[in-house]
Image (tube, rainbow, N blue to C red):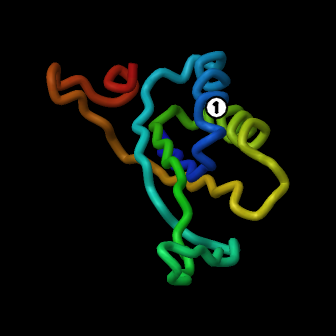
Amino acid sequence: MKKLEAIIRPEAFQSLRENLDTLGVKGLTVSEVAGCGQQKGQEGIFRGNRYEVKLYPKVKVEMVVEDTEVTDIVEVITSTCATDKVGDGKIFVSTIDEVFRIRTGEKGKAALI
């Protein structure tokens, strides 16, 4: 099993959710996050004071899937969320040793469904 964490632009989330549905991906954890990377800071003015914005709003989408699904899901994420501009995001893939469903005690693949 693999855990995919995708940090994406907020405006791309709804389309991504719809496209993941077509692959049969049902279980997601979604968080509003803020971060920075290669994007340059922006300058703003609030009540006459200048300030620099160093963090940008993002959406973090997490899912645990079977190893065989990773390539297709990564392709959907990249094709849906890419704008070819700095700040499109990142995808992190890590190995999950085991998963348990708290309610029933099921483990492994049965706990993912």
Give above or below for 111 relative to 83: above
Depth order, front residue of 111/33: 33
Depth order, front residue of 94/61: 61
| Residue farthest to the right, as pictured | 84
Q: Residue at x 33, y 41 (%)?
A: 98
Figure quadrant of residue 18: top right
Quadrant (top left/top right/bottom left/bottom right) for the C terminus: top left
Does 12 sit left or right of 3 as displayed? right
User: Disc 1 designates what residue?
Assistant: 16
Give above or below for 12 relative to 83: above
Does 22 sit left or right of 79 as displayed? left
Q: Residue at x 64, y 20 (%)?
A: 23
Figure quadrant of residue 53: bottom right
| Residue 62 placement (x, y as % from top left) | 46, 42
Figure quadrant of residue 85: bottom right
Give above or below for 27 relative to 33: above
Q: Residue at x 65, y 56 (%)?
A: 89
Q: Amino acid at mark 1?
A: Leu
Q: Residue at x 57, y 75 (%)?
A: 45
| Residue 73 placement (x, y as % from top left) | 65, 34
Q: Residues within 10 Å of mark 1 (few under 14, many from 20)?
A: some
| Residue 8 placement (x, y as % from top left) | 61, 49
Does 33 sit left or right of 12 as displayed? left
Depth order, front residue of 20/59: 59
